[in-house]
Amino acid sequence: MTGTEPWTSTEDVERLLASQQYIAEPSLVMAIYLSGRLGKPLLVEGEPGCGKTEIAKALAAGTGGELIRLQCFEGLDARSALYEWDYARQLLTIRLHEASETPQALEREVFSERFLLKRPLLRALGSDSPHRPILLIDEVDRADEEFEGLLLEVLSEYQVTVPELGTIRAKQVPFVLITSNRTRDLSDALKRRCLYAYVDYPDLEKEVAILERRLPDLGDPFARTIASFVQRVRQDPELSKRPGVAETLDWAAALLALDRTELNAETVLATLGFLVKDAQDLRYLREQRLTALLE
Amino acid sequence: MAGRLREGLGGFCRFLRQRGYPVGIGVELDLGEAADAIRLWDREELRRACGATLARSPEDLRFVNESFDLYWTSADRFPNPPRLESDTLALAPARRPRESSGQKRREGSQEVERPPVAIPLGTYSATAPSSGHSVEPLSPRELRALRHGARRFRRRLATLPGRRRARSRDGSIDLRDTVRQSLRHGGEWVELRRERPRISRAEFVLLWDVSGSMREHESRFFALVHSLLAVSRRSRVFVFSTHLEEVTSLARRSGYRRAAATVGYRIDRADGGTRIGHALAEFSEKYGATLGPTSTFILLSDGWDLGEADLVRDELEHIGHRAGRIVWVTPYTRRPGFEPSVGALRAARQQIDILLGPEDFESRWPLRPFPL
């Protein structure tokens, strides 16, 4: 197993992320740097919409590595995550060759790598691209606890055993990023195998910087007005879903598309749905909090 | 890496263990590798590297950072520019034995004498570690009774489908039972039998008050927390006194006694009462979104509150909108003449769905909610 190192210092990581318009906290930069150097998966937790998935995209774009994404969901199993045999093609091949080949030869044929459907985890291990692939295991807390058990072998040894083919070892250690929204506690065994970083909501200055980087047409005063409004919304304890950075960017992009340069009650009422994505929250903000938020 | 620094890092890991924070050998080795990859003379870099390798949650991060500041006491231990090449980087454990400091003076004349740092174990302040003491474990018999009661409680408050299935009128078709039924009628399918998953799993979110007024009940309440976590894997537990902290992974550790020791050393036990309303507000802000209609919110507290009682009521009302049910467990429900008249408990009476005592979780007692 080899791994070409795309960074040799924390400054490299910071520059790489900045080149992809991603502004990271120093603690996150350190975790990414160490994850690459130590060859250990990085577990990133944080509120939804705070840029966890974007880290993987920025790293892939910055390093030129292939981004391989495994979106987790309840019921996710080895067949969707690791590999599956292409049963339809196997059956067809058997029917086509059953007269001409011996059963043993036929068995060898249909259980060869040609009939293996590689799912994200196996694809990441088998990648022979010159750059380290970026394996994103997104929202692992949505998957069942049994799935974490499956990840343990893959992430600690970077190998997978397919009974018919033997053990497949990674050609190069992928950069593994696991994200979680903390809707449930992950197992200790999985956490032990990972480095850890937490992505919190950005403070005002960081949010302004993100807006300016991503949407330079906004200009400083308007970006600051938007960020201040979002910060006030986020502090409201009555909200069931607080807006993340993704929602801020969506809202700012909508305001830009509407050629707005200032926030007033009419504009906010018309576009608040881009920022707040819960019907009750939306009603509450519109009916009870709008005036206070605009002050 | 400089030998003394490696020793210092080992000392830091030991210090964390002393404070009840689990640091395994594998993680310690990771920290050593991380230290090789960073600029050791940069205090902030080492701090961040410790956070990335040792922490597993935001609460852990806060704890590791706080411990880091306590252990590597002052900024002058990280001189600028770097002195790594000369192997004189002064990173020594705060609880260094006396002889080693004398030895150090003999070894390097450039070494600056640093005052020893006293770490008052067993008390809490914003600047001192809260190592505390182990929670006194209950006897195996008492624990068995609680575990049994916790199972009974889970069955009563279950909201989620389990693996077992039960007959139902409108579930999915149970072919096996349909065929078995048909055999009784000469193979004719007279009825399509149906089944659906039995509602048997529960999701508890526990907030445990560990302030001074709850100290005498600590053993029983920890055993209860441990039992509830054991019977419901989807549960989470938070402790609060001066601040709120999640201790799920610590309390869930294998072995009740081990978990009691780990959690006991980790929690901050503030003397006197607590501000329940503020703890609830902090919970809502940080973790409120994880509550859902299937969650049962359980508050373990005697209700002695130093804050505003109205805040408790408002926050519980807010939580009640999100969670399926609110259960308050107070130590005194079975005492003669008990009335929920203590500040916070009285204010929150309307918001509580079920009021219980720890005895209700023991198998020898029936589960008998206090009438509200």
Image: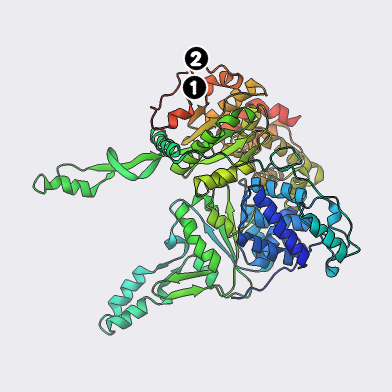
Q: Is residue B329 above or below residue B341?
A: below
Check the image and name the residue furthest to the top. Answer: B337
Q: In this orientation, which residue lies closer to the viewer: A85 or B124? A: B124
Check the image and name the residue furthest to the left. Answer: B186
Q: In this orientation, which residue lies closer to the viewer: B68 or A229? A: B68
Q: What label sits on residue B337 in the rendered view?
A: 2
Q: Amino acid at mark 2?
A: Gly
Question: Rounded to the nearest whole Å, what is the CA distance between mark 1 and mark 2?
Answer: 9 Å
Residue under label 1: B333
Q: In this orientation, which residue lies closer to the viewer: B290 or A283? A: B290
Which residue shows up at 50% across the image and 48% down it?
A: B255
Q: What label sits on residue A175 in the rendered view?
A: none
Query: Which secondary structure, mark 1?
Result: loop
Q: Residues within 10 Å of mark 2 (few under 14, many from 20)?
A: few
State the image coordinates of residue B180 (x, y, percent, origin top left): 17, 48
State the image coordinates of residue B327 (x, y, percent, origin top left): 49, 28
Q: In the rendered image, is residue A198 in sight?
A: no
Q: Residues within 10 Å of mark 1 (few under 14, many from 20)?
A: many
Q: Is residue B16 above or below residue B110?
A: above
Query: Which secondary structure, mark 2?
Result: loop
Q: Chain of mark 2?
A: B
Q: Amino acid at mark 1?
A: Thr
State the image coordinates of residue A175 (x, y, percent, origin top left): 61, 65
Which residue shows up at 68% across the image and 67% down it?
A: A37
State the image coordinates of residue B132 (x, y, percent, origin top left): 66, 40
- Identify the image quadrant of the N terminus of chain B: bottom right
Check the image and name the residue furthest to the right. Answer: B110
Which residue shows up at 73% across the image and 62% down it?
A: B7
